Amino acid sequence: MDLYIVASYMPCFGQSARVYMDGIYSTFEDAEQRQRDMCGGSIVSTQLGNNSMYGENGRITWMKKVKIGDLQKLDIYSPDSLSKS
């Protein structure tokens, strides 16, 4: 079973960003909606070929597709590609 983790951070100049896990969802669509909710308004695609979103509020979000069980040293800091599959 695939699950989608939504992560985000608020850029802070001069200090390390605090990355948050904002939810785990069973569908891509639910995870994408959570990204939109976290972004607080207008969304700007990063145009980098991944699922990152920049929000009107300055927050940056992305999602990771994972399987139930061990995460195999999941790199939460890198967004996945745009595909749902």
Image (cartoon, grey):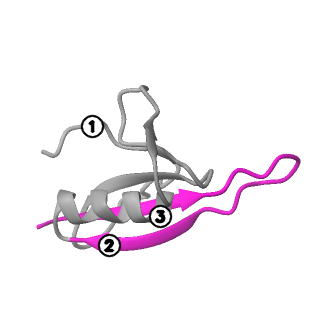
Q: Horizontally, is 69 left or right of 80 in the view? A: left
Q: Residues within 10 Å of mark 1 (few under 14, many from 20)?
A: few
Quickly name the residue at label 2.
Answer: 24
The amino acid pointed to by label 2 is: Ile
Which residue is rendered at x = 70% and y = 50% of the image? Answer: 11
Q: Which residue does the image show at 48% across and 53% down from the upper left? A: 61
Q: Residue at x 45, y 71 (%)?
A: 22
The amino acid on which the numbered mark 3 sits, given as a three-letter code, is Met
- Which image quadrant for residue 48? top left
Query: Is 1 drawn above or below residue 60 in the view shown?
Result: below
Could you tell me residue 16's position as x and y percent?
78, 54
Q: Amino acid at mark 1?
A: Leu
Give the image location of residue 4, x and y in percent: 27, 62
Quadrant in which the C terminus appears:
top left
- Residue placed under numbered mark 3 in the picture: 38
User: Which residue is located at x 29 percent, y 62 percent?
Assistant: 33
The span from disc 1 to disc 3 (Cα, nearest Å) is 18 Å
Q: Which residue is mark 1?
A: 82
Magenta extent: 1-25
- For residue 43, above or below residue 69: above
Q: CA distance from mark 1 to mark 2?
A: 18 Å
Is residue 27 one of those drawn in magenta?
no
Q: Residue furthest front?
A: 41
Q: Which of 15 and 58 lies nearest the eye of the viewer?
A: 58
* Foreground of the two, 49 or 53: 53
**Mark earlier in primary sequence (1, 3):** 3
Crowding around mark 3 (Cα neighbors within 10 Å: few <14, some 14 to 19, many 20+) is many
Q: Are marks 1 and 3 in contact (CB under 8 Å)?
A: no
**Mark 2 crowdedness (10 Å alpha carbons): few <14, some 14-19, many ≥20:** some
